[in-house]
Image (cartoon, grey):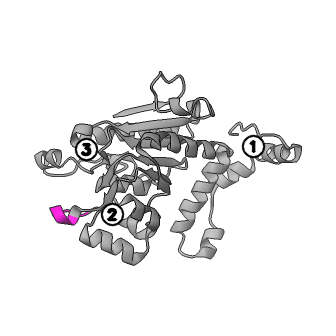
């Protein structure tokens, strides 16, 4: 597993292709690469824990505002669990935040982008579902084929049912069919398509659009959408408690945003 913030990144880092356009990503974006191409980036217990640690660091570091996760090579983003490792253990061995350290992480108010460089199957699709935004290469396939190997996609079914129309989610879950990237875009699983050589640059460009917003505003936005969906009614969502929203409203950045607009200048965000 490889993870790195873009601050001081060496030549050849994923940020190189955008450096001449905008330098915001160098200090604020964490890139995470699943580096098991010989296993189609399928995850064993060690890889799960590496990802858990990477997302823990992302959550705890206030200088990191957006994460981009991708896979090594050009065949697979992630092919799910390493079934050979699972067979040896006789069970899954997942960290506290579930598959890839993100699928059952419910308190992260920073955006995560999936740069789907190849097939996202089983747990790979679970990762995509757990991300806030996703781009994909055209040749990628998406699906939850666990029923075909006698398993169930525990980490993906609840998200799939919430993110897709019921009949679409049911067909994918019950048949285990794999759908092409263009269909995934049509279903709303993926935001758009990128050519294989451009997907990381496109994901970083998307991250840069997020970075144009105030850090506390972005966090409050994700918190309100996430918690609002958990509310039993729309009225309850409007009346809910949103601590990140309250911190944002009391921040200096809230005043800075209004001042910058009135003065017709770019805002200078401090994150406080």
The 10 Å Cα crowd at callout 2, few under 14, some 14 to 19, many 20 or more, is some
Residue 150 lies within the magenta run: yes
Q: Earlier in the sequence, mark 3 or mark 1?
A: 3
The residue sitting at 55% across, 50% down in the picture is 109
| Residue annotated with mark 1 | 253
Q: How many marks?
A: 3
Which numbered disc, 3 or 1, marks the residue closer to the eye?
3
Residue 240 at x, y percent in the picture: 62, 66
The answer to whether any part of residue 154 appears in the image is: no
| Residue annotated with mark 2 | 179
State which quarter of the image contains the N terminus. Answer: top left
| Residue annotated with mark 3 | 40
Inter-mark Cα distance, 3 to 1? 43 Å
Label 2 secondary element? strand
Query: Which region of the structure is painted magenta?
Result: 147-152
Image position of 76 (left or right of 240): left
Label 3 secondary element? loop
Inter-mark Cα distance, 2 to 1? 43 Å
In depth, the one of 16 and 30 nearer the eye is: 16
Residue 230 at x, y percent in the picture: 51, 67
The 10 Å Cα crowd at callout 3, few under 14, some 14 to 19, many 20 or more, is many
């Amino acid at each position: 597993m490889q993870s790195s913030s873009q601050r001081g990144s060496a030549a050849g880092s994923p940020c190189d292709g955008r450096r001449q356009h905008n330098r915001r990503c160098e200090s604020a974006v964490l890139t995470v690469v699943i580096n098991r191409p010989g296993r189609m980036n399928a995850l064993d217990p060690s890889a799960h824990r590496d990802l858990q640690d990477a997302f823990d660091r992302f959550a705890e570091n206030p200088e990191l505002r957006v994460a981009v996760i991708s896979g090594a090579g050009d065949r697979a983003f992630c092919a799910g669990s390493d079934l050979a490792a699972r067979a040896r253990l006789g069970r899954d061995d997942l960290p506290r935040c579930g598959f890839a350290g993100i699928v059952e992480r419910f308190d992260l108010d920073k955006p995560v982008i999936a740069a789907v460089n190849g097939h996202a199957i089983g747990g790979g699709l679970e990762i995509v579902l757990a991300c806030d935004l996703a781009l994909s290469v055209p040749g990628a396939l998406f699906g939850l084929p666990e029923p075909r190997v006698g398993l169930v996609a525990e980490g993906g079914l609840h998200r799939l049912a919430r993110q897709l129309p019921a009949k679409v989610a049911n067909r994918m879950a019950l048949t285990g069919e794999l759908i092409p990237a263009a269909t995934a875009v049509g279903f709303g699983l993926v935001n758009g398509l990128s050519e294989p050589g451009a997907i990381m640059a496109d994901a970083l460009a998307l991250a840069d659009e997020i970075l144009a917003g105030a850090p506390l505003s972005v966090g409050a936005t994700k918190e309100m959408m996430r918690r609002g969906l958990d509310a039993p009614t729309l009225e309850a969502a409007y009346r809910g408690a949103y601590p990140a929203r309250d911190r944002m409203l009391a921040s200096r950045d809230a005043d800075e945003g209004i001042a910058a607009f009135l003065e017709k200048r770019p805002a200078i965000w401090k994150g406080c």
